[in-house]
Amino acid sequence: MTVVDRIVDGRIIDGPGGYTGVEADEQWAAEVRRLASARNATILAHNYQVPAIQDVADHVGDSLALSRIAAAAPESTIVFCGVHFMAETAKILSPDKTVLIPDARAGCSLADSITADELAAWRDEHPGAVVVSYVNTTAAVKALTDICCTSSNAVDVVNSIPADREVLFCPDQFLGAHVRRMTGRDNMHIWAGECHVHAGINGEELSEKVRSHPDAELYVHPECGCATSALYLAGEGAVPADRVKILSTGGMLEAAKSSRATQVLVATEIGMLHQLRRAAPGIDFEAVNDRASCRFMKMITPAALLRCLIEGADEVDVDVETARRARASVARMIEIGRPGGGE
Ligand code: SF4
């Protein structure tokens, strides 16, 4: 019996945590590859996906890098193994392609911190203000945004706005606090949003981990919602600055390949450890918090990917006008500073 036969046979289970019932074995991987090719699809996997999904994908990376790969890909269908706003961003940048996500319920607590209606009401309270949104936002919020930003270029984006204009910064309060400190700007209002994962990477735990691993380097991923609290703490001096490396995903992988460190502490979602261990097998990588796992990312299960390829679902769509306006705010982001790669 093939894997597809088993699914047709009703073995796939749809539960609150996602689709289950399929083992990520060699037969599964071969079936995924065969179905992707039959659909003329390329499979993109975010760094925080489970290892089996990363290993079967055509490309692994951060959200913006993957969206750019999606736009340039010759295939007509993009299967985006990540959370929903990321698949939406891919659709915004590749409006003519079919974009699928293996489970559309894979949301993001940070992106869900602010709705388009809430942003519209906030803007009405501050006429003339410039809206800056982190890339972890829905297409509808991006469409109401003047300039999107990543953590890498958030300071440059805010500095590019005339000093006398008010700034509305959303949705991440930790990134917002970091930007306000770096720019010294007092006319910047910050939305009180956060990612549920970064709540687990607190200052006490971070400081304790650094104290108990005196020779280890600390990698903090700035483009990750779950690491913005660590970024803030590092800037506050909670950990010694010479041991902290604020790195994008690509930068983290490059640093690991050339590092002489024997141990590296990683303050980000734990899925990143898989790529780091592959890049530098001689280094002992340890999560600052091994519970820092995004349950939404982990909804993209082997069963969900297979179902997606068999059924051509779940398709992600963004209406033409929302996509046009969202694309403009993303384009402005790409023009300013060093945007890095998104989460
Ligand atoms: S780790 Fe946090 S910011 Fe990233 S996708 Fe998950 S909920 Fe969103």
Image (cartoon, rainbow, N blue to C red):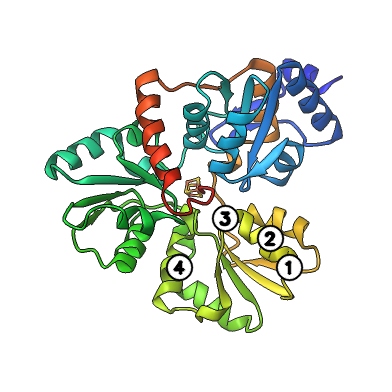
Image coordinates of residue 270 in percent, x first then y, are 62, 56
* Residue 131 spot, x, y in % from top left: 27, 44
* Label ID, residue 258: 1
Mark 2 or 3, closer to the camera? 2
- Confirm if mark 3 falls within 8 A of ligand 1: yes
For marks 1 and 4, give the one nearer the viewer.
1
Quadrant of res 335: top left
**Ligand 1: does it lie within 8 Å of the C-beta at label 2?**
no
The residue at which mark 2 appears reads as 254
On the rendered structure, is 229 left or right of 312? left
Question: Which secondary structure, mark 4?
Answer: loop
Residue 327, above or below 230 = above
Under circle 2, the secondary element is: helix
Instruction: Determine the secondary structure under disc 1.
Output: helix
Dot 1, crowdedness within 10 Å: few (<14), some or many (≥20)?
few
* Disc 2 + disc 1, Cβ < 8 Å: yes
Q: Which residue is mark 4?
A: 202
The amino acid pointed to by label 3 is Glu
Depth check: give the residue in front, 200 or 91. 91
Residue drawn where x is 41% and y is 67% of the image: 232
- Mark 3 / mark 4, whichever is N-terminal: 4
Q: Is residue 2 visible?
A: yes
